[in-house]
Image (cartoon, grey):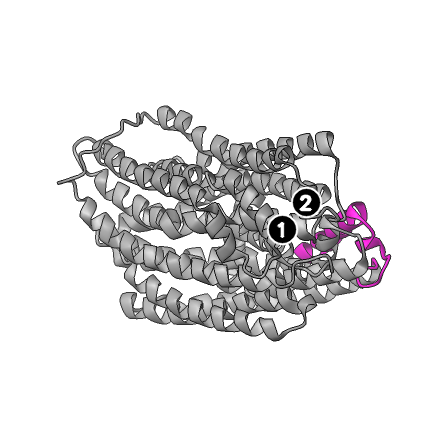
Amino acid sequence: MADGIGRASAFLASGTIVSRILGFVKAILLVSTIGLVGVSTDAFTIANQLPNTIYAIVAGGVLSAVLVPQIVRAGLHADGGVAYINKLVTVALVILAGTAVLATLLAPVLSLILGPLLSPDQRALVTAFAFWCLPQIFFYGLYTVLGEVLNARRSFGPYTWAPVLNNVVAIAGLATFVLLFGADSDGVRVASDWTPAMIAVIGGSATLGVAAQAIVLFYFWRRIGLRYRPDFRWRGVGLGSAGRMASWTFGMLVLTSLAGVVETIVVGSASGPEGNPSATALSNAWLIFMLPHSVITVSIATAYFTRMAEHVSHDRLSDLRTDVSSATRGISLIIVLAAAGLIVCAYPFSAVFSSVSFDQVQAFGNVIIAYVIGLVPFCILFVVQRTFYALGDTRTPFFFTLFQTIVVTVLVLLCLMLPLSLTAIGIAASVSIACILQLTLAIILLHRRLGSLDGARILRSLGKYLAAAVVPIAAGVGLLIALGGTTPGGFAVSGRFGAIISMVIIGAVMSALYAGGLLLLRSAEFRVFLDPILARLRRG
């Protein structure tokens, strides 16, 4: 990994780590405040996912796919791309503002679409939360637009550090709720127990956090010399090419979001007082799944993405292929260990969120495991997808996403045949299976586009990583059993303290054994990672 990419990735990762730690604090506090299972927590989870779903459909990946390559190319203009940036940002914000207003007005309809299997009282609570949460659409978009412009200008830090502010505001909101209305960690509150003030504090603080995360980026724009000036003169500046790219990505996101709607409807069938893992359990398991992806994959791939777009703009496809190989091998080096560690520590991780009963810990832990099975393919797919974006090709990702949507929708609908206690696990496993198949198709299509992808070298490296993980997994499982992580009342699942201590012990042992295995197998990628650290220690 190039030294510049390494430094940028490390800085991105540092912000993501802090943000994710606070995100876990927020998730744990939310579970302590309104429960992990139950009517109330599922209602808020569904409502708070609505802005993410709609934003993803309207603009989420479109902005990431289009903005960076277009802004890199616009940097060749005489003004450094300033005029183009203002026009592109204005277009995006007008669309986002209109979408946020319309979605908020349609909150009752959207709640009915996502919760047809919910009781009328629970669906009414979803609607009440949605009125407060849906304005997040605009602020998510504002954050992405401002952040991607900063990334294209190689100012990577603010985009990953801004979510820290979001989590701080949301945590403050949850603390305020507990002080004013009390906590309900067992999730026994029913829909009729919620007052407008309670809904406003929970939903309003969530939206305020997203708004703060976005608005703070204006400060960093000024730091790099940019001043946003709304510009509605959109003709004659090449926005048509951006629109054509966006149209395919828009279609891709519609497909992804439709699959997400199916997942929400199916998992809603398990929601209720019985305590089955449902919407909130899936959401928190996905948060755990996304931790290594956000810290490692996104940090490394974001740093590479700008350079990939530059290679394409200068017609250096051999350099692009080198970056694809390097990014894939560098990401997989760490993600293999992360996946192994999350699978072994799934039950203690579950106990961090809720240790009401061992059955609940076990059920939530199994949802985590089902998701994490697909972690390595998911992270490699992210690199492949960003490679197509750097090439200015959003059409091909549409088709391999269409394939994934069909597979995951069929598998998720089949989960309706499972016992309600297994519905969430089945959905998570369906997502993992579909991701593995999607990656296979995506690699075939990228190989047709670029030719050689350095596949033999990538497979050799992956083989070494997997071989090096065998002993750490065995040792981790042994430690988990010794610490009582598989038995009711065991230290590792007895509460947050025991769970965290157990995960630290297991994680440290697995990491040390994994590093030793990579050294024995003479992993070149691990030496690239290790040598700068050893050099600094020697200098110190």
* Residue 71 picture quarter: top left
Q: Amino acid at mark 1?
A: Asp
Can residue 71 be seen here?
A: yes
Look at the numbered disc 2 and give the secondary structure of its residue. helix
Q: Amino acid at mark 2?
A: Ser
Residue 458 relative to residue 453: left or right: right
Image quadrant containing the C terminus? top right
The answer to whether residue 11 is above or below residue 308 is above
Crowding near pointer 2: few (<14 within 10 Å), some, many (20+)? Answer: few
Residue 281 screen position, x and y as percent: 65, 55
Q: Which residue is mark 1?
A: 121
Residues at discs 2 and 1 in contact (Cβ within 8 Å): yes
Look at the numbered disc 1 and give the secondary structure of its residue. helix
Start-end of magenta stretch: 483-512
Disc assigned to residue 532: none
The answer to whether residue 216 is above or below residue 206 is above
The answer to whether residue 148 is above or below residue 341 is above
Secondary structure mostly seen in magenta is: helix
**335 or 404: nearer the viewer:** 404
